[in-house]
Structure formats: structure tokens, C-alpha cells
Amino acid sequence: MFSRRPSKDDAASDQPHDPVGHEARRVAPRSPGEAIKPAIAPPPPPRIRRPRGGMLSTLSGLFSFLALICMIAVIGLVLVARQAAAPGPLDQDQVVVIPRNTGTAGIADILAREGVIDQPLLFQIATVISGQRGNLKAGEFAFRANTSINEAMDIIAQGRSLLHSVTIPEGLTSYQIVNLLNDHEILDGEIAEVPEEGSLLPDTYRFERGTSRLQIVQAMQRAQTRELARIWERRADDLPLETPEELVILASIVEKETGRADERPRVAGVFINRLNQGMRLQSDPTIVYGLVGGQGTLGRGIRRSEIQGETPYNTYVISGLPPGPIANPGRAAMEAVANPSRTDELFFVADGTGGHTFSRTYDQHRRAVTRWREIESERREQREQQIDRIDEAEEVLDQQGNLEPLPRPGRATSVDDPAFANVRDPGRVGLSVDVSEGTPLDPLAFTGFDLNAPQTVPDLPPPPGEEGATGGAPPGAAPAGILPPPRPATL
């Protein structure tokens, strides 16, 4: 009744002794098979949970968010790159003009409007990703069919604009060159002042849309300065020319005297010989330039009074070179003057074949001039004979009655007109000429039929005298004034 309460030590002593401390009580095996079974593993120790928070938790969340953003960005870049490299909607080649001072959004809208791309926003994103946003240029660009966004972006960024060209022939005056540039449709701007004669180099110049006419003139002037310096450096040592400007003056005369490349050095040699001997150049183009300046040609032959007329450029009157060029010579003419042919010839005259006959003495030159005048006379007679022969042929036709005069335009004409008598009458011998040509009955001038739709053409009565001929038109035939008469057979 007054027993002692068990203490903790007594309770512990009542538990079986576990030498390991963590293993469960081992039970004695009941059989050999049970003895070889493995013992049950002890349970894991309890996990101590500590409260999370602070800087480490914040950094961990931030890194996780950044990783997610990077993953989304990579996927987006892959999709954008794939879409930008895909073929575009353009089904045929297209030329697009990008005006100056157009932003990326404006360029994307223009390309979408012209059908080059179908996703303007994707184009803008691609320019940002590729770093080409600030490199897009203005100009006129050609896009091939199925051009992708990447290809369109590269074409514009690299400035591969279409190039147009203008060709300036040799021998034009500065005034004529300015008129030629003013007539060009693609060039912009105006030329306020005509450049100096001989300061422009004739050539073919390529330019982009938006280039001004003044820029072309400036390019021609730079080219002339560069070429003249190069040619002057390589000139012959014994030329009677003191400055490059004198070389241009003489080259302009050579340019106007002959258009044949093989004759330029020879013509230049003749003028150099005349300058060395103190002879006047006596060049016809200098007379013309002295009369009309650089605004054009006379449009007729030179009169004797004009040959003897005193102008600063008339080399029949003045000695030496004129005060300035009479045209803008090309490279070949300037090179011919810088290195002329070594010859003792002093004269030349046209030979009737587009070239010239060169002479050493005045007697030879007079015979060549006589021969040239005979050629001119023969050509004039041939032209007159040709005109007379045509007139006589028309008179013979009228007298023989083979072909009546053609009806005049605006004259009411029908198949009953006497002009078609040789067509209606098979016994009348005539020429194989369609007399309906140029008249209201010309079948080529008749536009009443639709050639794209089937038509029923009425039968025409055969000409009188042929088998099956009848006096009237068969039923359903069109009136005679509508359809043209049949063409006569060739005899």
C-alpha cells in the first residue's frame, strides 16, 4: 500500500538492452531460414525544418525568374529568326522606292504596302535583333520574288540601290549637255548656270534615283579634271601647246572634225603641223561656233560670206587657236592631240565615205576637193533623178489607167467608186496593189469585229465574169459600203 513509485531509472532498466542504441529489439530466430533474413533498417532521423526567409531566399527567387525570362527570350529569338528567314509573300520581282528620312516603322509599312513583307512588326524586331536598325538607307531597291525579311533588310542596309545611267556623247556643247540632262526624267533639280565649254567629260554616268542634275555636272567636271591631268602628263614633248586648256581647245576642234576613231590622231597631226608652220587652222566647225555659239548648228551649209566673217572663233580669219573650246571633247580626242600621228600632211577633205582624204601639198588638196565636189554633185543628181523617176512613174500609171488615184482621206467611198474599177473588172489588167489601203474600206482600219469571239462572215458575190456570178448579193450579205472589196490577185 505504501509501495514506492517507479522512477525513470527503473523504467529504463526494464527496457531490453540495445548495444547499438538505435536498433530495434532483436528477436531470436525460430528457424534457420528466418535467421538468414536481413534485419529491418532503422527509420531515418527526423528532419529538422527551419524557417526560410532573408536575402538568400530573395536571390534564389530572382535567379529563378531570370532563368525563366532567358528561356522565353531564347524561344522567342528562335521563332523570330525562323520567321525572318522564311520566304516572303512577293510573287514577282518588285522595285520599291524608300524616300529619304524614312524611319524603320515607315520602311516596314512601305514594304508591307508593296507586298514585299506581310509582317511589319516582325521586320522592325528583326532590325533591332540584327543591329541594322540604324543602317537602313533610302533609295530605289529591287526585290526578287519570295524575298525574306532578312534578305530585304540586308538589301536596304547595304544600300544596294538600283542604278540608272545617262550617256553624254562626245562633241556636244555645254548648252546641249544641260538640255540633255534637263530632259532626263529621273534626275532631280535644275542647273542654274551653263558650265564652261570644255569643262565636262562626255561619258556614261550611273546614278541612283534622287540624284540631282547638278551632281551629274559636278561629277563630269571632276572626271574632266582628272582625265585632263592624266593625259597632259603623257603628252608628246614637242607639242606647240603651252597649257592643258589649249589641249582641250584643239581636241574640241578635232572632235568636231571627225567622228572616226582611226582618223583622230591623223587630223590632230594635221592641225599640229599647221600650228608649227604658222598656218591658220581653217576649221569649218569654228565658223559655226562663232555664229551660233554652243546652242546648236546652223542647219544649213556655210556661206562664203560667213567664211570670211570675223568672229573670235573663225579660224579662217584668226591665227592660232580660238579663245576657247567649241565643244566638250572625249578622252580619245584629247589623247589624239596629246600624241598625234607623225605626218607631214597639212590638208584634209571629206572623201564621201565618212572619212577624209589627206594631202601634203595644196595641189593634192585641190584635186581632192574637186573630187569631193563631184561626189556631192553626183549625189545631188541622184536625189533629183529619184524624185523625177517617182513623178514619171505616177504619170505613166495615170495615163495607162493601171491604177486610179487613191481616194483622199475623209472622202465617202464605196465599192462603186471608180477607183476600184480594176478590182471589180477581172479583164482589166492592173497592178498587185490594194487600192483600199488608206481609205475607209481598208480592212486593217475596220474595227467592228471582235477577233476574240467567233463571227459569221457573210459571203461576197464573185466578180462579174466568174462562174457562179450573180447580179445581186446573196441573202444575209452585208451592205457593200461596210465590208472592204476583195484584194486583187497578184499578176
Image (tube, rainbow, N blue to C red):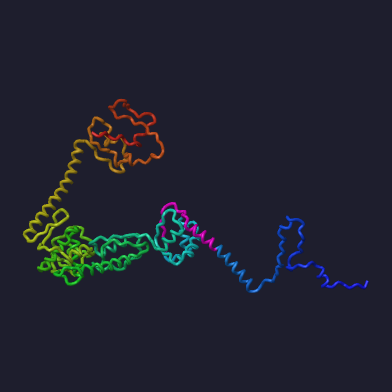
Q: Does the rendering let one see residue 282?
A: no
User: Which residue is outermost to the right?
Assistant: 1
Residue 453 x/y as whole percent: 41, 38
Q: Quadrant of the C terminus?
A: top left
Q: Nearer the viewer, residue 342 or 184?
A: 342
Front residue of this view, candidates 480 and 139: 139
* Residue 21, image quadrant: bottom right
Is residue 391 something one can see in this rendering?
Answer: yes
Report the front residue among 233 and 374: 233
Q: Which residues are magenta?
A: 73-99
Which residue appears at 84% of the width and 73% of the height? 7
Q: Which residue appears farthest toward the left when viewing the image? A: 363
The residue located at (69%, 71%) in the rendering is 50
Percent across and percent down for residue 110 are 46, 60
Magenta-span inclusion, residue 227: no
- Residue 97 inside the magenta-drawn segment: yes
Is 386 drawn above or below residue 18 in the view shown?
Answer: above
**Quadrant that contains the N terminus:** bottom right
Residue 479 lies in what quarter of the image? top left
